[in-house]
Image: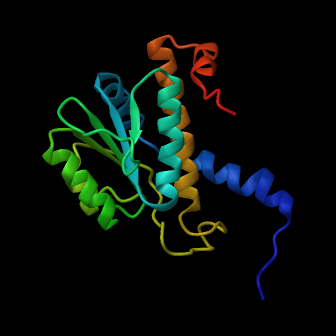
Amino acid sequence: MPRSLPEENHLRSVIPGQIASLMARIDVDEVKALVKAILDADTVFVAGAGRSLLMLKAFAMRLVHLGLKAYVVGETSTPAIGPGDLLIAGSGSGVTKTTLAIVEAGHDRGATTCTITANPEGAISQVSDMVVEIPWPLTKISAPELSPQPPGSLFEQCMLVLGDDMVMRLMSELGTTPEQMRARHTKLE
């Protein structure tokens, strides 16, 4: 029989508390280096699989709102990658085979590569120029003693929050206002 926790516990304590605790452990210098790489890049590409890719799609959208060129690998409108470009990959496990192949291809074509991962020792990090670690030990295995959330959820939540943190840093660096970002938001609805 599944254990039941009061809804208030999840909404007001467990999830926000776990996110805040894990975000506080991310190396700010790694984040600053990635923000600089984004600013230096001609074009930013994002890649990943599953929910990690969904978090990076949200980040790519915000980069476009900032006025930067950003694309999602695998979309039909994504152009070729090359020197001067930046590829940001996300993989909690650090070993996702499709993501590894994409990072290797980006590196082979002269792009700078960065991996956001919980496993900086994984194969993807080993072929990346930069790594931003979200220091969470488990992404595939359920460990109720560490987190009552489904496997991978905490990593993915922190990846989304990390993206928003970087957007705020980029807004400051670029002098971009919320009004300018709103003006670049889709107007097709």
As drawn, is 74 to the left or to the right of 56?
left
Considering every residue shown, the one lying at the far bottom of the view is 1
Q: Measured from the top left, where is residue 11 in percent x and y? A: 79, 54
Vertical placement of residue 61 versus 11, above or below: above
Whether residue 153 is visible here, answered yes or no, is yes
Residue 35, picture quadrant: top left
In terms of depth relative to the viewer, which is nearer, 14 or 58? 58
Residue placed furthest toward the top? 175
The residue that appears at 80% across and 51% down in the rendered structure is 12
Q: Quadrant of the N terminus?
A: bottom right
Q: Looking at the picture, how far across and down is residue 80, in whole percent? A: 25, 40
Quadrant of the image for the C terminus? top right
Quarter of the view holding residue 111? top left
Please name the colour scheme applied to the rendered image. rainbow
Instruction: Classify residue 19 as left or right of residue 101.
Output: right
Residue 37 in percent (x, y) is at 30, 29
Residue at 48% in and 72% down: 140
Residue at the image point whose x is 63% and y is 53% from the top: 18
Say which of 97 and 21 sits in front: 97
Residue 155 x/y as whole percent: 52, 56
Residue 99 falls in image quadrant: bottom left
